[in-house]
């Protein structure tokens, strides 16, 4: 499970693995139809079905050493604010590591996505997981694009991923090294 940030921390957040007890709280994410659309989960009809699928995918990733999103816990109030992590992906027939993030609606616009995504970026490069990192973002998801840009990723090109047009954002380790040594 080398790609997981279990027991890592940022200034305001603690990372831990998702567990079954998180289900009810995490289901709130999928009550938002816009999130459902942006995540490409419209084939699952109810918030419960979407959340069940999310948990299935996450536990599959954990079990098969494919990374996965970690639960983000606020250090201030011990509440779950979202998830963020490194996902092993195959994109355009290449091995990639994606920085992925989802923040619960009531905690958005507080910088949690940016803070946790930066931790993922640094953790991946410090551990030499890959020479570049990506984020795959729905073209309409302006908030996620802003997080990627703040995290040093730049728009690369449009791709088709899971039968959807998506924007690919990337950062090379050499660019990260230049910015961390300034």
Image (spheres, rainbow, N blue to C red):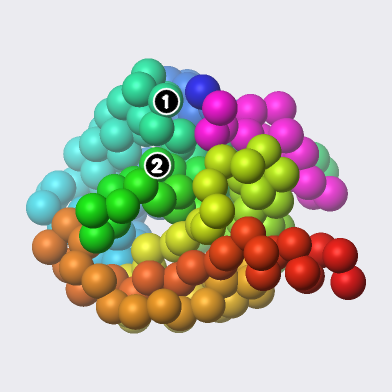
Residue 71's spot in the image, x, y percent? 56, 37
Tell me which numbered mark, 1 or 2, is placed earlier along the sequence.
Answer: 1
The picture quadrant where one finds residue 51 is: top left
Marks 1 and 2 sit apart, C-alpha to C-alpha, by: 8 Å
Residue under the point 35% across and 47% down = 95
Residue 76's spot in the image, x, y percent? 81, 44
Residue 108's spot in the image, x, y percent? 58, 64
Left or right of 103 on screen, residue 162: left
Residue 77's spot in the image, x, y percent? 77, 41
User: The magenta stretch spans which residues?
Assistant: 2-15
The picture quadrant where one finds residue 79 is: top right
Answer few, some or many: residues within 10 Å of disc 2's Cα (few below 14, many 20 plus, some between 14 and 19): some
Location of residue 157 with respect to 80 vertically, above or below: below
Q: Which residue is mark 1?
A: 65
Please say if the residues under marks 1 and 2 sit with CB atoms less than 8 Å apart.
yes
Q: Which residue is mark 2?
A: 88
In the structure shown, which secondary structural element does the residue marked by tag 1 occupy? loop
Q: What label does residue 163 carry, if any? A: none
Location of residue 2 with respect to 147 vertically, above or below: above
Q: Residue furthest right?
A: 182
């Amino acid at each position: 499970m080398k790609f997981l940030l279990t027991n890592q921390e940022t200034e305001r957040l603690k990372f831990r693995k998702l567990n079954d007890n998180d289900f009810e709280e995490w289901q709130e994410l999928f009550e938002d139809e816009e999130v459902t659309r942006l995540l490409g989960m419209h084939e699952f009809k109810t918030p419960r079905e979407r959340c069940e699928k999310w948990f299935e995918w996450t536990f599959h990733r954990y079990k098969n050493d494919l990374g996965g999103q970690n639960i983000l816990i606020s250090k201030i109030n011990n509440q779950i604010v979202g998830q963020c992590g490194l996902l092993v992906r195959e994109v355009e027939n290449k091995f990639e590591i994606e920085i992925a993030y989802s923040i619960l609606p009531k905690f958005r616009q507080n910088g949690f996505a940016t803070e946790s995504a930066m931790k993922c970026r640094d953790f991946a490069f410090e551990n030499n997981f890959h020479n570049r990192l990506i984020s795959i973002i729905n073209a309409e998801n302006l908030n996620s694009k802003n997080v990627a840009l703040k995290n040093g990723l730049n728009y690369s090109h449009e791709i088709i991923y899971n039968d959807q047009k998506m924007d690919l954002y990337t950062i090379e380790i050499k660019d990260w090294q230049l910015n961390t040594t300034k």
